[in-house]
Amino acid sequence: MNEKLQKLKQEVLDNLAIIKDFYVLKDYEVRIMGRKGELAEILKDLPSLPEEEKKSVGKLANDIKVELTAKFEELKNALSKKKSEGFFDATLPGEKISRGHLHPITIIQNDLEDFFTSLGFMVLDGPELESDYFNFEALNIPKHHPARDMQDTFYIDMKNQAGEYDMVMRTHTSPVQVRAMQKYGAPLKSIMPGKCFRSEATDVRHEHTFYQLEGLMIGEDINLSNMTGILEATAKHLYGKETKVRLRPKFFPFVEPGVNGEVTCFICRGQGCKLCKNTGWLEIFGAGMTHPNVLRSGGIDPEKYQGFAFGFGLDRLVMIKYGIEDIRLFNSGDLRFLNQF
Ligand SMILES: [Zn+2]
C-alpha cells in the first residue's frame, strides 16, 4: 500500500506540472482527492490491515494528502488569477487614446503656405543634401568667396560624378530658387519652405537644424515696390492690419540690393517693450532684388526679367509669436514643451 501511495503521489505531482487550465485542474482534483477519488480507493483496505501497519500507512497517507492538497490550492490560485486577467468586460468604458498634434513650426508653415498659395505662389520642395554648386556657386557665392564664412557648413564625405567632394547639407532654402528657375523658367512665383543645417555651436538662439521659408517672384518689370507690397501683406497677415514694415540695407550675396526687414512690434505696437528690446521693431526677414548672376544660373535672361526673393526663419517666427526663449526646444522632442501647442 505504501508503494501504491508513493506512486500516486509522484503521478499527481507530474500531472500538476503540466496542467495549465483552471477547470481541468478542478476536475483532476476531484478525481484524485474526492470522496470516491483515487486516494480514497487506495485507502479503502486500510481498516483491514494489522494494527502496526495501519498506523504507519495512515501517517503516510495523511502526509501525502496534506502535501497534495497544498499543491492543488497553490496551482488553483495561480490559474484563477490568470483567468481573471484574461476576463474582458465589454461594459467598461474604452481606453482613451491620446492624439498627437502638429508641431508649432509645422502650424506656422502650413499657415504661410495657405497665405502664399492664395496670392498665386507655388509651394516647392528641394533636396536637403545639396551640391556645393546649388547651395553656393549658383547663388553668386563662388569658392573662396568671403560670404561662405557667414555660414558654418556641414560638408559631406561623398564624391560627385566628377570625383569631387562637393555635397553639403543645405545651409539655406535658396538652392531651391535656382532649381525652380531651371525647371519652370520665367515668370515664376513660388515659396520654398524646409529644413536647413549649419554647423553651429548651439545656444538659445542658434541650432544646427532649423527651418526657413523662402519666396521668389520673377517677371518682367518686377521692382522693389512689388517686393515691399508682398512683404507688407505678409507682415499684416502674421501680426495684424496695423503692422508696418521697415527695410534697411543689408548684404546678401544672392540679391542686389539686399535688405533686412523689420515689422512693428505686435506686443507694444512700436512703443518699446522687452520683446523688441525697446526698439519698437522686430527683425523677421531678409530680402532683396535677385542678383543677375543668380538669374543667369537659373537660365533666365536678366536683361528681360527681374525678380525679388525673401526669406523667413520659421523658428524665429514661432519664437516671437509664443514668447519662446530657447530655439533648442523645437527639436528636443520634450512633450512638456510640445503639449502646450
Ligand atoms: Zn515691443
Image: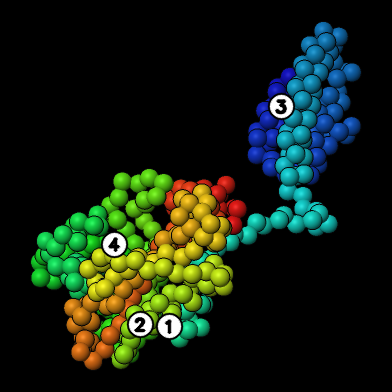
Tell me if 204 is positioned left or right of 140 in this view: right
Q: Relative to 129, say whether 333 is above or below.
A: above
**Residue drawn at (81%, 41%) of the image:** 27
* Residue count near mark 4 (Cα–Cα under 10 Å), binned few <14, some 14–19, many ≥20: many
| Mark 4 or mark 3, whichever is nearer to me | 4
- The verdict on label 2 being within 8 Å of ligand 1 is no
Which of disc 4 and disc 1 is earlier in sequence?
A: 1
Tag 1 residue:
121
Pointer 4 and pointer 2: residues touching (CB < 8 Å)? no
The image quadrant of residue 22 is top right
**Residue drawn at (10%, 66%) of the image:** 163
In this view, the residue in front, 134 or 242, is: 242
Which of disc 3 and disc 4 is earlier in sequence?
A: 3
Looking at the rendered structure, the number of numbered marks drawn on it comes to 4
Spatial distance from mark 4 to mark 2, Cα to Cα?
21 Å
Tell me if 231 is positioned left or right of 80 in this view: left
> Which quarter of the rendered picture does the N terminus lie within?
top right
Spatial distance from mark 3 to mark 2, Cα to Cα?
92 Å
Across and down, in percent, residue 317 comes to 47, 61
Q: Relative to 152, say whether 10 is above or below.
A: above
Across and down, in percent, residue 24 comes to 76, 44
Across and down, in percent, residue 8 comes to 72, 29
* Element class at badge 3: helix
| Mark 3 or mark 2, whichever is nearer to me | 2
Q: Amino acid at mark 4?
A: Thr
Which of disc 2 and disc 3 is earlier in sequence?
A: 3
Which disc, if any, is residue 9?
A: 3
Tag 4 residue:
171
Q: Amino acid at mark 3?
A: Lys
Which disc, if any, is residue 217?
A: 2
